[in-house]
Image: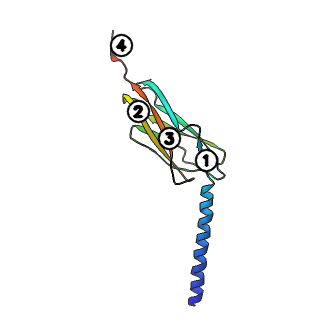
Amino acid sequence: MKKVIFAILLGSTSLWGGAQNVLDSTISNQSIRFNTTEIDYGTIPQHSDGSRYFEFINTGSNPLILTNVVASCGCTATEWPREPIKPGEKGTITVKYNTAIVGTFRKSIRVFTNSGNEPVLLIIKGEIKPIDSTSNQK
C-alpha cells in the first residue's frame, strides 16, 4: 500500500512539473509592442486636454492580458483594456495628466502583462504654462 501511495505522489509531482513547463512556455510566447513608449506634450496651456494615447499590438501567438497599469503619481490617470487582446490585435492605453499643475513634468507609467515579469515603461513629459489671467480683463 505504501508503494502505491508513493507511486501516486511521485506521478502527480511529475505531472505538475510538466504542466508548469507548458504554462511557462505559453507565457513566453506572448508579447506586447508599443508604437512609441514616450509622448512629449510639448508646451501646452494650463487646463488644456491632458489625454494622450499609447497604442500597442499583441505580437505573440497567445492572448495578451494587461494585468495592471500604474502611474508614478496621482497626477496621472490611466485607462486600459481589461479583456484579453488576441494575437495580432491592437489596444490603447489612455493616459491623462492633470494640466492644472503648472511647470515641467516627466512621469512614468508601468504596464504589467502576462507576457513577462518585467513591466514596460512608458513616459510622458512636457511643460504646462499658466494662463495669463490679466489678458482676460478689460
Residue occupying the point 51% across, 36% down: 38
- Residue 55 shown left or right of residue 135 in the figure: right
- Residue 123 shown left or right of residue 134 in the figure: right
**Residue position for label 2:** 105
**Residue position for label 3:** 122
Depth check, mark 4 against mark 2: the one in front is: 2
| Label 1 SS | loop
Name the disc covering residue 85, or none.
1
Give the alpha-carbon distance from disc 4 to disc 3, as whole Å.
37 Å
Name the disc covering residue 107, or none.
none
Quarter of the image where one finds residue 89:
top right
Q: Is residue 16 above or below residue 132?
A: below
Give the alpha-carbon distance from disc 4 to disc 2, as whole Å.
26 Å
**Residue position for label 4:** 135
Give the alpha-carbon distance from disc 3 to disc 1, as whole Å.
19 Å
* Sequence order check, earlier mark of 4 and 3: 3
Residues marked 4 and 2 touching at CB (< 8 Å) = no
- Residue 100 shown left or right of residue 65 in the figure: left
Residue type at numbered disc 4: Ser
Number of other residues with Cα within 10 Å of mark 3, as a class: few under 14, some 14 to 19, many 20 or more: some
Q: Tell which of 100 and 39 is nearer to you.
A: 39
Q: Is residue 55 above or below residue 68?
A: above
Number of other residues with Cα within 10 Å of mark 4, as a class: few under 14, some 14 to 19, many 20 or more: few
Depth check, mark 4 against mark 3: the one in front is: 3
Q: Residue furthest bottom?
A: 1
Number of other residues with Cα within 10 Å of mark 1, as a class: few under 14, some 14 to 19, many 20 or more: some
Residue occupying the point 44% across, 24% down: 44
Give the alpha-carbon distance from disc 2 to disc 1, as whole Å.
31 Å
Depth check, mark 2 against mark 1: the one in front is: 2
